Image (cartoon, rainbow, N blue to C red):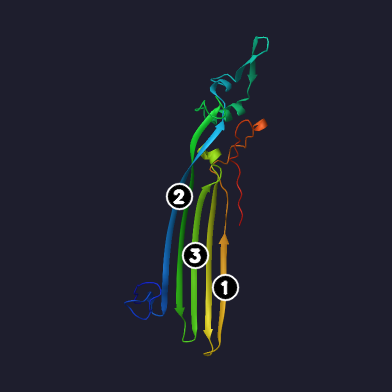
Amino acid sequence: MEATFAKDGADDSDPELGGATFSNFNVDAVEYQVFGQVLGTTQVMPVLPAGQRPSGSSNLVYDTVNFPDGTTDMLDIPVTTSIASILARYPLPNLPTGSFGANTYATASKVTTNADQFSLRIDHKLSAKNQFFARFTMCSLSGPTTNPDQSAIDPAFAVEYLDRRRNVVGTLTTTLTLKLALTSSLSITRSTPGFPTLDVSDPAVKFEGEHFPRTDPSFAVFSD
């Protein structure tokens, strides 16, 4: 079969202008688009300084209490191993002049979005009275990151929005007379939005009183 290629919307019967022609089989258009975007956000949050975390092999945190009469007392606060490992994942403060004082941590966190779209349109003349049209469209969207505040603590905590859309449509047109034509069309759409995370093993952490940012890397929702 001989194939010729040319611009969308051109005369398919002309080899110099027509779409991709395979006998009576015409590919009218093929389209591919790519979109990418990275936005920077500034995240400011309170975190524990080194003096308020267990260090080395000790599971104790020492806290000095100052009383109104000028006396002080040193408290030994035990921290369980599981909580100590979670606290270790939080960064140390880096902005003592920030809104949370000596507990302030400020950093940049990326919000990434990538999209790929592909579509194919086909026209096929079955006979003098029958024409078949079909189109396939594919769109793959990755992002944006929905929790840049948590990915600033640990990139593995990132939860991204994903969508994988697919659509196919077919239309058959039969011309019975100059004044009468019948058209039948079938369209199928598949969409699978989801919110996956790279970290599927760590539990969610919520501090009492909301004094420190929570983490919830196990959050994931899928629908079909």
Q: Position of residue 32 (x, y in %)?
A: 42, 62
Q: Position of residue 172 (x, y in %)?
A: 53, 79
Q: Are marks 3 and 2 in contact (CB under 8 Å)?
A: no
Residue ID for mark 2: 37
Q: For mark 3, does the 10 Å Cα neighbourhood hold few (<14), some (14 to 19), or many (20 or more) residues?
A: some
Please tell me whether residue 75 is drawn above or below residue 197 in the rendered image: above
Residue ID for mark 3: 137
Residue 29: quadrant of the picture: bottom left
Q: Residue at x 49, y 75 (%)?
A: 133
Residue 89: quadrant of the picture: top right
How many angstroms separate mark 2 from mark 1 (CA)?
Answer: 35 Å
Of mark 3 and mark 1, the one earlier in the sequence is 3
Q: Residue at x 53, y 60 (%)?
A: 165
Q: Amino acid at mark 3?
A: Thr
Residue ID for mark 1: 186
Q: Position of residue 51 (x, y in %)?
A: 56, 20
Name the quarter where the N terminus is drawn: bottom left
Please tell me whether residue 56 is drawn above or below residue 85 in the rendered image: above
How many angstroms separate mark 3 from mark 2 (CA)?
Answer: 22 Å
